Amino acid sequence: MSIDPAVLVLENGDVYRGRAWGARGQTLGEIVFNTGMTGYQETLTDPSYHRQIVVMTAPHIGNTGMNAADEESRRIWVAGFVVREPARRPSSWRSERSLDQDLEEQGIVGIAGIDTRQLTRVLRDAGVMRAGIFSGDALAPEEELLERVRAAEPMAGAHLADAVSTDAEYVVEPSEGTPVVADVVAVDLGIKGMTPQMMAQRGIRVTVVPSTITGAEILAKKPDGVFFSNGPGDPAAAERSVAVLREVLDAKVPFFGICFGNQLLGRALGFGTYKLRFGHRGINQPVMDRTTGKVEVTAHNHGFAVDAPLDGPTESPHGYGRVLVSHVCLNDNVVEGLECLDIPAFSVQYHPEAAAGPHDAAYLFDRFVDLMQGRRATSAVVKDGA
């Protein structure tokens, strides 16, 4: 195991010294913490972590290695990785290679051997901030490293979806023998691989398209439903995607959004969004479905949230009828879901695809199927009665 020195420098001037892990060099980004006890591979390959340095609060990371089946996208997206104690060797029968090997081969600069619990307490108190990991030739006096960190671009105002989206559309078909119940256009704003798989398990044929698609191009495909995925960046900077979503809502095509898609729905309806102090990232967040009273343990990865009234229904400021805050986080009352009562659209802030995480919220994909089937039934009635 490497004993090369590494330094983590926070925007507030705090310095943590440890040992280099993964690639050597310099990386800059917003430092955030993840409270999951497992699922580090899904975290690393989640495009929503683009330009973020991730701190794992679980002390022992890497023991299950890495494998092709658990990857959520084509590469590791985190800007840097911070752990307390990396595994000396993977011990899972599913492991195909070590975590350290993947980090090094993909150029991900990491640091190990620091007190991640102390660091997490700092981030909870002071809020997430810019940071940098430095090792090898990138090491320099602390004053110079701090200047590099403070010169880095902040997450607020960043438009990042285009950088992580697919370059060309592709189709995920239902498994063999499963009848097609709906055709959905899924806009890739940083989509995780498990999401279209969860839809395909329910008979949905999913056409995944780039983030740059226009509303006219979506509607020309005549989909039964439209989906907006998770993704990185500030939703306030995604004005183009919000405009596209309004075209979908205007056409009354059934819509479902997850995470970034929830924030974009909120903005399309006329609500604001804001940056959370330290965000929600982990696989153990309690959320209440206010439409049923059921409490779910859910997977989260978001640093922004929708600013909508909890007491509702509320009229959409942009004229889309009544909107209900359908889900709320029980830790801090953050809006975790929206349901439109007068148009066929809903969204959630968390990750029902549960990669990694619990499966309490998988029913939301069934709710999407029901919404699309209800929409098609209504259209058929109108057509027959015309």
Image (cartoon, grey):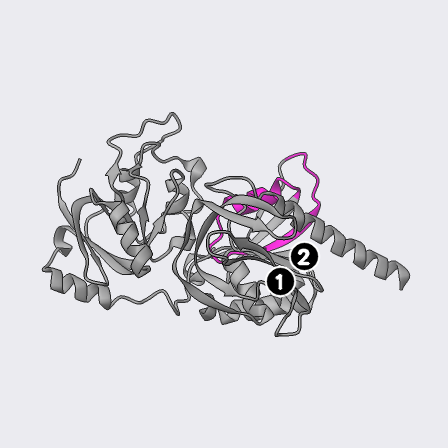
The amino acid at mark 2 is Pro
Most foreground residue, 146 or 104: 146
Image quarter in which the N terminus is found: top left
Most foreground residue, 213 or 72: 72
Where is residue 101, by image quadrant?
A: top left
Q: Which residue is mark 2?
A: 223
Q: Residue at image x 34%, y 50%?
A: 33
Query: For this view, does 198 lie left or right of residue 375?
Result: left
- Whichever of labels 1 and 2 marks the residue nearer the N terminus, that label is 1
Marks 2 and 1: in contact by CB < 8 Å? yes
First to last magenta residue range: 176-203
Q: Residue furthest left?
A: 141
Q: Residue furthest bottom?
A: 318
The amino acid at mark 1 is Ile
Q: Position of residue 382 (x, y in %)?
A: 84, 61
For label 1, the crowd category at 10 Å Cα-Cα, with few meaning under 14, some 14 to 19 and many 20 or more, is many
